[in-house]
Structure formats: C-alpha cells, structure tokens
Amino acid sequence: MSNLIVHGGAPLRGRVTPSANKNAVLPVLCATLLSFEPLRLHGVPDITDVRKILEIFRTLGSEVQMDHATGTLALHHRDTAFDAARHRLPEEMRSSIMLVPPLLARFGVARLEDNVKGCTLGVREIDPHVDVFRRFGGEVERVDGSLLVRSGGRLRPTDHWLDYASVTTTENFVLCAAAADGTSVLTNAASEPHVQEFCRFMAMIGVRIEGIGTSRLTVHGGQPLGGGEFRFDEDFHEITTFLALGAITGGDVSVRNSAPGNFPLIDRTFAKFGVRIAHEDGWSRAIRSGPLKVQTPFTSNVLTKVEAAPWPYFPVDLLPIFIALGVRAQGNAMFWNKVYDGALGWTGELSKFGAHVFSSDPHRLITFGGNPLVPAVVESPYIIRVAIALFMVAASIEGRSEIRNATPIRRAHPGFVENLRGLGVQVEWTSEE
C-alpha cells in the first residue's frame, strides 16, 4: 500500500511533458500480437500494466526490448506461442481481455481468468465482450475458474450494434474484425481520443478502417499486417490534471499538448469555474485571473452542471478532477456521472478537509464550494483520478495532508511525483505493509 504525503499551499509553476495515455497504449500493445513483423513504439510509459503485458509477451516467446529511459519499445512476435493448458492471462488488469482476439486469430484459443479487474468503478461486465467474440465465431465457456475462448477456424466478419459505447468492447471488435476475412461494421462504437489513437495504429499496420472518431466503424479485415513505427500522443487526462493542479493552487502551469483539438469541451468546463485555457505552440496553460468561482448560468434557478458520459460528452474519468475544483470554487455546482454506478461514493472523504458535498443519488452530487478547508488524512478507493482529485484538494491547502492507498496513480502516471516536485510541490511516497 502506497500513500502520498503532501505539504500544500504553494502555487504550482513550471512546464510538464505528460506521458502517453495508458488507455491507448494497452490496446495497441495487445494489437501488436496480430503482426508477425517488427514494430517500434515511442512514448511507452513505464507503468505497471505495461510491464505486466510485456512480461506476458516474454513468457509467450516474443522478442521484447524496452528502454524505459526513452520510452522506446521494440517488439517482434514471429516466434510467439500460446498453450491454453499452461498460459493464462492475468486478472489484475482489465486490458487482459484485449489479448483474446489476437490469440484467437493466431492460435485459435485464448484463456483468461474469470474476473478481469480494473479501477473499482462499480459493476463492469464482460458480457459485451463475450457477445463480440461469439459474433465473430468464437466459442466461450467457463473452465476451472477461467474463461476459455476458441474458434474453429478463421474469424468471420459481422455487423454488430453495441448496447452502449464501451471503449474496450469497441477495441475488441476492431481487433477481431482486423483478423476476420471480410468487412465488419460496428454501430454505437466508442470514439474517445484513445480509441481514435488505437485505430490510427491499426491503420498504420495495414487495417483499413472507415469512420474513425465517429459512432460507426467499418473495418476491412483479413489482410496480412505489417510492422512500422508509431508515436503516442500525450494523455489528455494527464494534460487536464496538471492544468487543474495549476488552477486549484493559483499557480501557472504549462503542459505539452500536441492534440488541442480534443479540448474544446474540456476548456469550456474549466471556464465554468473561472479558469481560461490557452493553447499555443504545442503547449496548454491554465489562466486564473482571480479566485476560483462557479459561473452563474444564464438560465435562472438552475445549477451549473458538469455532465460526464461517453465521448464526445465530457470525459467521465475527469469528473473527480473537476469535483476538486468545485470544492475549492466559490459557489455551487452539480456533477453528474452518467456511466458508472457508485463511482461517487468516495466524496465523503472530502468532508475530512472540511468540504461541503451533498450526494443527490448514486450518479449525482452537489458541491457547496468556497468553505475554509484544513489539511487531512484521507482514504482513496482504487480509482486513479479519485486519488489525484484528493491530492489536488490537499495541494491547495496549507499544511500536511496524506492520501492513503494512492497506489492507482502509479497505474497511469509514471513520474507523477517527480513532475510535481518540478512544479514546486513538497510531496513524497510512503509505503505500508
């Protein structure tokens, strides 16, 4: 168990180059198994889930050369072998399920633990993935506490309409479709920036995909896939996080951002709390001319709202970051998580700082901001951005605070503490057994 100790109250100042988005990196790593050619990836972050997947590749006989100092990864899967009797995909990370399509395509079989896990964001079913595997001709059964997926031959193309726009299910569909002989169409596809980045990688290795960035994807599969080089964009979650840290502490932080086209709605959401975002010459900067203040809606008798749902809505993963801003801002705001059940249960921890937060129901809460806050020791659930949101509040308060169970930050943000120190924060990791 790792905890974060922070001595808050100092404005953050400086420049940060964020890491790549793990939600793009992990599906791309899984997709590399579809190619027998050499591949080189740039900007691969040194995070636990990446290390786990690379260890799987080594176990299966792939050539793996990872330079953690530069973030450069060379892969060659020409001698990869999978034995369902011996090899199992780990349950500790949800991305394991995206190894199923390439294993099906290459070996006709895949085996993973029955309960794949990720952040504790409520019930995250695997039924949509099972539906996709079966649509492409896979047979799925439970065997000895594992899921065993088999295909009797080449995957067959299909048309499918998702119940909801799931990111990993969309990526699994594209992976299966790339290996199927023919054209497959997915309706109600997820379109988040990391899904688009994943699709661009698939196109780079030779998969023709129409509709990238929309809710309808057409994938022309069955062609031999090549190799090449691919460079990841900066993670828009991490960009937003550092901009918010600058804003909540009254500092001046600039963040490297090569894809500002993803930010219009995020920028407008910052503006609801009196923060202006400027994008110039590949950098983004949060500008605050006065105290954080919730902007009054033009429509009378309604609360300012932040509604989070699948892209192109405001990203649900960023909602905790803005709840932290709402706690510090003068005025009241409503936050609405339209995706996960129970994902707002952590907000009771904010009261330990002296914050006033009211939970309307499992999906909505109201912040009554602007109250004087005090340092505190708080407990984070296993949710990446929640641990960061609690840290944000602590960093804005003069004095020593502790974020307990902050381990999930390591899953997404390599060098997080080092970056913070470079911005002037007194922060350190501590561990307990």
Image: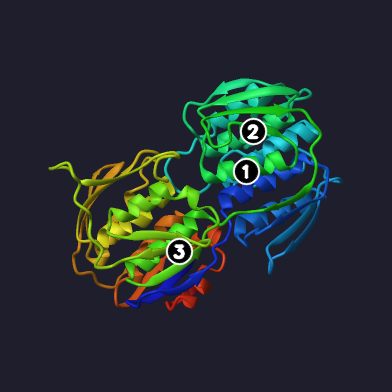
Residue type at mark 2: give it: Val
Q: Secondary structure at mark 3?
A: loop
Name the residue at 34% across, 59% down.
276
Q: Is residue 370 visible?
A: yes
Of 13 and 382, nearer the camera is: 13
Residue beneath disc 3: 406
**How far across and how far down the image is residue 49, in percent?**
61, 54
Is 349 displayed left or right of 382 in the figure? left
Q: Are marks 2 and 3 in contact (CB under 8 Å)?
A: no
Residue shown at the point (68%, 63%) measured from the top left: 71
Give the camera-side residue of 80 and 235.
235
Q: Left or right: 266 with respect to 87?
A: left
> Label 2 belongs to which residue?
174
Q: Is the Cβ of the residue at disc 1 closer than 8 Å to that at disc 2? A: yes
- Front residue of 417/408: it is 417
Q: Which of the numbered marks, if any, corresponds to residue 198?
A: 1
Q: Tag 1: residue type?
A: Phe
Disc 1 versus disc 3: nearer the observer: 1
